[in-house]
Image (tube, helix red, strand yellow):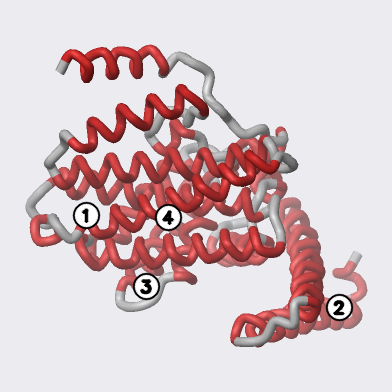
């Protein structure tokens, strides 16, 4: 027992030691998910990291409440994903750091799978236990933020690394769907997720739009009965955004939207968020012009990426469903560009 006390005393002191944090560009600062956003301490490496992991494993082994254990395993998943991001962005050219990056990703996946299996133990009590409700709030919030972290990493890799991140993203969605089926009350989900998006956004339009983007991504990647509740949550979030949009200073609001547009996100998802913004919020003419210009840029970016992917598939002699889907996406993008060009030719005055 004395050994345990000494170990935890050392771990308490270690919290003050500087930890690894990814470097980011100024225009992306509002899009970066931090350890504080996920409710954990900054990850540490080396001997410090080893000691912190030891303390965690001891505490985890001495914990028997299934909800507490699920929260602890979610903490571990958060830490591993933050570690992976730091290893990737801080030392992209160092072999050892890239090995650690891959190891951290594998541990993240493992932790998320264990969270899913743990929810099986308390799914029958979800309607009467408020602690399960609190866990679901946190878990839903964290999954949305995980996607933002993975998004940033995807923008810094290509080839096999990009494919691995996409697979991890898909698996995260599957795990999330299973947990929702295990313990969520479907009728409560729209309100829950709209509250989370509002908390992510606060008074900042850039963060609110990022939250809408994450929810749009979740909606498009979830299957089954829960999908309609996610759509309801997205609709509710947009209604709330429309209600507070006019209360924000127009000039500041436009600048924050620009920050969102310059942040790290998948071009396809940004394009869809801009469509939602145009169709659900009262947008002034100045911002409308910015949105249209950005949508054209995003379409061009998507086309260039799609062409690069096709070239890569040809070089690797890749075949199968993914290639077919990519070809269809390329066609959709080309059609979108052609339609916009035709509209500009038919309305030369509006093109200016």
The residue labelled by disc 2 is 341
- The answer to whether the residues at label 4 and label 3 have Cβ atoms under 8 Å apart is no
Distance (Cα) linking label 1 and label 4: 14 Å
Q: Quadrant of residue 28?
A: top right
| Residue found 70% across the figure and 64% down from its top | 159
The residue labelled by disc 4 is 109
Distance (Cα) linking label 2 and label 4: 44 Å
| Residue found 39% across the figure and 32% down from its top | 40
Q: Residues within 10 Å of mark 3 (few under 14, many from 20)?
A: some
Between circles 2 and 1, the one closer to the viewer is 1
Q: Which of marks 1 and 4 is nearer the N terminus?
A: 4
The residue labelled by disc 1 is 118
Residue in front for this viewpoint, 250 or 78: 78
Distance (Cα) linking label 3 and label 2: 35 Å
In this picture, residue 192 sits left or right of residue 164: left
- The answer to whether the residues at label 1 and label 4 have Cβ atoms under 8 Å apart is no
Q: Quadrant of residue 314?
A: bottom right
Distance (Cα) linking label 2 and label 1: 53 Å
Q: Residues within 10 Å of mark 2 (few under 14, many from 20)?
A: few
The residue labelled by disc 3 is 227
Q: In the rendered image, which quarter contains the N terminus?
A: top left
Distance (Cα) linking label 4 and label 3: 23 Å
Q: In this view, does 231 lie above or below 138?
A: below
Per the image, label 3 sits on a secondary structure element best described as: helix
């Amino acid at each position: 027992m004395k050994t345990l006390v000494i170990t935890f005393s050392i771990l308490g002191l270690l919290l003050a030691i500087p930890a690894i944090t990814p470097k980011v560009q100024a225009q992306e600062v509002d899009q970066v998910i931090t350890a504080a956003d996920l409710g954990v301490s900054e990850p540490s490496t080396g001997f410090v990291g080893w000691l912190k992991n030891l303390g965690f494993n001891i505490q985890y082994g001495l914990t028997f409440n299934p909800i507490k254990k699920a929260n602890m395993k979610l903490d571990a998943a958060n830490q591993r994903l933050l570690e992976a991001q730091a290893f990737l962005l801080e030392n992209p050219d160092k072999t050892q750091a890239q090995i650690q990056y891959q190891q951290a990703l594998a541990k993240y996946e493992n932790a998320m799978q264990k969270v899913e299996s743990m929810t099986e133990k308390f799914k029958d009590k979800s309607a009467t236990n408020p602690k399960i409700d609190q866990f679901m709030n946190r878990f839903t919030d964290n999954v949305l933020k995980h996607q933002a972290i993975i998004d940033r990493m995807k923008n810094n890799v290509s080839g096999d690394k990009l494919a691995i991140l996409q697979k991890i993203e898909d698996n995260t969605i599957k795990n999330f769907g299973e947990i929702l089926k295990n313990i969520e009350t479907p009728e409560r989900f729209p309100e829950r997720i709209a509250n989370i998006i509002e908390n992510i956004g606060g008074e900042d339009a850039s963060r609110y739009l990022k939250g809408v983007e994450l929810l749009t991504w979740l909606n498009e990647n979830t299957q089954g009965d829960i999908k309609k509740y996610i759509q309801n949550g997205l609709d509710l979030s947009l209604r709330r955004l429309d209600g507070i949009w006019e209360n924000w200073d127009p000039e500041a609001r436009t600048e924050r939207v620009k920050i969102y547009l310059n942040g790290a996100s998948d071009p396809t998802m940004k394009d869809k968020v801009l469509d939602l913004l145009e169709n659900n919020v009262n947008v002034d003419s100045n911002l409308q012009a910015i949105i249209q210009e950005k949508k054209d840029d995003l379409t061009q970016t998507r086309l260039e990426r799609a062409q690069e992917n096709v070239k890569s598939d040809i070089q690797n002699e890749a075949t199968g469903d993914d290639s077919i889907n990519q070809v269809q996406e390329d066609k959709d993008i080309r059609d979108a560009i052609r339609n916009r060009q035709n509209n500009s030719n038919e309305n030369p005055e509006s093109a200016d």
